[in-house]
Amino acid sequence: MILSEAPGKLYVVGEYAVVEPGHRAILIAVDRYVSVEARSAEEVGVLFSTASDQPLTWRHSGNVVEFDEDTAGFYRYLVAALQTVERLRRERGLEAKHYELHVSSHLDDAATGTKFGLGSSGAVTVAAVGAIGCIYGLNLSPEKIYRLAMIATMQVTRTTSGGDIAASSLGGWVSYASPDREWLFEASLERDVEDLLAIEWPGLCLDRLDGLDRDDEDRAAAYTASFASSTAVESPAESPLTVRVGWTGEPADTPELVGRLRKKTALPSDLLRRSDAQVEALEKALTSGNIENLSEIVAEARTILGELARQRDSVIETPELTALVESALRSGWAAKSSGSGGGDCGIAIGPAGSDDRELERAWIKANIRPLPLRVSSRGQKILADSIRSTNPRDSA
């Protein structure tokens, strides 16, 4: 049995700009996870999820993977991840295996199932890539995990920026610009997956902001070494910032909101330029530890979103999000909506170690639910004990 985990995500700044190739956003991975458990199988493989009572059976047939039912529905991201890693397996000449994948998500409300907007499709794709990669001993670095998950996602949709995939793959604070998705989609049809893991992707920027290199082969090797112990592979640096998350109680439809604001045309160039400037300013604050301008950076990012909403006759900051932001500001925190807006979560940001008790009281008074989320210092990870439990030497 192999257990792969990938964290959810939240956007900090640049959430609409990043939809345009080459423009950046800063995201955080959060400490709630999607788990994909891989178990060996014989003649057929099976996909399971705690969110569905209908499993999906699959099998190898020559050079393709066949599924017993239509794959366009519930399991589409899991199917795409499986097909992509199996393509890489064939290119490397590795023997095919059947396996079961069991998916469980802890990104949503445990009691009601309400979605908080933490990027479940990206996290499940990343976790599945990690699990299948481990089955075949591929020793994938964080950037290769991202690339495989992004190639897989292009089989499902070309509208996503892939920011959720980046945060789930790398963990921590991530600076990200999406690649040219049309180029990537065409390239994924024409080129080997192995080639796509090695070549430059137009527009792509993928970096941790706490000192961990995006393609740290040593980290990939450390994953393998950690299979023989219970030692976690964590990031080496601390952030100078603290993030707190509030829930408005209203789920948002991200694809619909993003589609409405883009209206099939690029976002205004002046707003993209200003958004990029705030991303750059926050990057400098994070990497230097000088956060004196934090409030101004977050306030300008909020202003940009408001201007975009007015220009496109849409709503990003709902009355509930306004209540979240204003109550956080009165408590001494910088604050804004997160992600597409229209509901879901808002964030408050302050210096590391900030006392959040007044903030939580203010949010509760404003009918905002504080969520017990923190920045996850790790991205996708194979839990060491899951490997050890299958090693015959461990029970000898």
Image: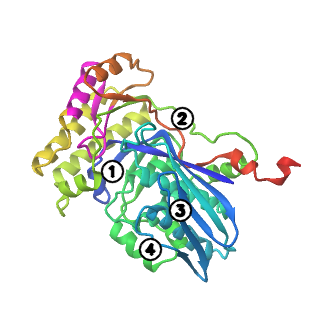
Disc on the earlier residue, 1 or 2: 1
Give the residue displayed 44% in from the left and 54% down from the top. Answer: 122
- Label 2 belongs to which residue? 237
Report which residue position mark 3 lands on.
55
- Quadrant housing the N terminus: bottom right
User: Is 289 one of the magenta-colored residues?
Assistant: no
Judging from the image, what secondary structure is the residue with disc 4 in?
Answer: helix
Position above or below: 140 against 240 = below
**SS under mark 1:** strand
Query: Is the C-beta separation of discs 1 and 3 under 8 Å?
Result: no
Measuring from the top left, give residue 245's x and y in whole percent. 37, 32
Give the extent of the magenta segment. Answer: 320-347
Is residue 336 found left or right of 129 in the rendered image?
A: left
Mark closest to the chain's N terminus, 1 or 3: 1
Give the spatial CA distance, label 4 vs label 3: 28 Å
Dot 2 amino acid type? Ala
| Viewer-side label of 2, 3 | 3
Viewed as shown, does residue 119 lie left or right of 44? Answer: left
Residue at (63, 53) in percent of width and height: 220
Residue appearing at x 31%, y 24% in the figure:
333
Name which residue type carries label 4.
Ser
Residue 205 occupies which quadrant of the picture? bottom left
Point out residue 260 in the picture as x, y percentages from the top left corner.
18, 56
- Compute the Cα span from label 1 to label 2: 22 Å
Residue of label 1 = 24
Provide the residue designation for mark 4: 188
Can you say whether 330 is above or below 340 in the image?
above
Q: Position of residue 304 (x, y in %)?
A: 19, 42
